[in-house]
Image (spheres, rainbow, N blue to C red):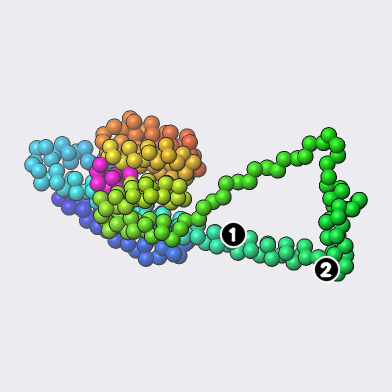
Amino acid sequence: MRPARFALAVVVLVAGVGAAHAGLFDDEEARKQIAATTARLDTLQKNLEARLADLEQQAKGQGLDLLRDLEGIKADVAKIRGQIEVLTYELTEAQKRQRDLYVDLDSRLRKIEAAGAGAPSGDGGAGAAAGIAAGTPGGPLASAAPSAGAVAPQAPPAPAPIVPVTAAEQRAYDAALDQFKRGDYQGAIGGFSGFVKTYPKSLLAPSAQYWVGNAQYARRDYRGAIASQRQLIQAYPDSPKVADALLNIASAQAEMGDNATARRTLTELVDKFPQSEAAGKAKQRLGGR
């Protein structure tokens, strides 16, 4: 009966995730729903982990039916975790688009204001322009010219331009993400892997590599998930997804029964990214062990 109760709890939790998705674009409400769903998942995860060992021992003596129920519960938990990851990602992207829009509007307003304030008017502006062109004494060119032997100051290097995401990149990324949402994890692995190969320099490439590992985790390919997340850390060490990759690695290590290594990975995550959301989850897991 206990596996049946676990399955019922998982169904109720999935329904909660669906409700959170319906209010995704109401930022405040979405954050509350995601936080509540995450808390319920953490509670369920702790309860499951506390009883999984007992169930595995019982399964050995009671046949394959109980073992299949146990594996089904593990798969459901992995699917729920993936759905929460999707919700969190979509909320973050919505907030990012809002910030980008605000920055773009603010930048345009500043340019308009600067153009209006610096526009020359009347003969005074024409005379100043003539002085600049001729390089007359006392004019801007004369005052700006360095004296003999003086070293001209070097301008600081311009920051590398940020290449925006193209429409083709966004379509490819969204297509793979839709496969993940539908539970087509093998298709998502192929879609995101192809994205990284085609657009290795894209702003979305680190996230795509992360979802490769996350989809492998959902398929219980824990070794593959660890390898994919380590590839993300190596290829994109400055990406914000590195913290999430470490958390995924620790989860895979724990599922493989290597709790000592998983604990070291969680500690590394907290040490390197103490302010990240992933670090908060890592602290909860460390405190519960």
Q: Residue at x 83, y 68 (%)?
A: 121
Q: Does residue 114 belong to the magenta stretch? A: no
- Viewer-proximal residue among 15 and 120: 120
Q: Does 177 appear above or below 147?
A: below
**Numbered disc 2: secondary structure:** loop
**Viewer-nearest of labels 2 and 1?**
2
The answer to whether residue 289 is left or right of residue 28 is left
Please give the residue where the numbered disc 1 appears in the rendered image. 103
In the rendered image, the residue lying farthest to the front is 134
Q: Amino acid at mark 2?
A: Ser
For the point 86% across and 69% down, the residue is 122
In space, the residues marked 2 and 1 are separated at their CA atoms by 31 Å
Quick one: 104 or 156, which is closer to the camera?
A: 156
Report which residue position mark 2 lands on: 121
Q: Which residues are magenta?
A: 213-221
Q: Who is closer to the viewer here, 152 or 80?
A: 152
Q: Is 156 on the left or on the right of 192, as rendered?
A: right
| Dot 1 amino acid type | Val
* Residue at the spot 21% in from the left edge and 37% down from the top edge: 53
From the viewer's perspective, tell me whether residue 141 is left or right of residue 115: right
Q: Determine whether the residue tagged by mark 1 lies in a helix, strand or loop.
A: helix
Query: How far across and down, in percent of the image, does residue 66 sit?
Result: 13, 45
Residue 236: x and y in percent read: 45, 41
Question: Left or right of 10: which side holds 40?
Answer: right
Q: Say which quadrant the C terminus sits in.
A: top left
Rendering coords of residue 230 (x, y %): 37, 37
Q: Does residue 111 lie above or below 251 as drawn?
A: below
Magenta region, main secondary structure: helix
- Residue 68 position, x and y percent, is 14, 46
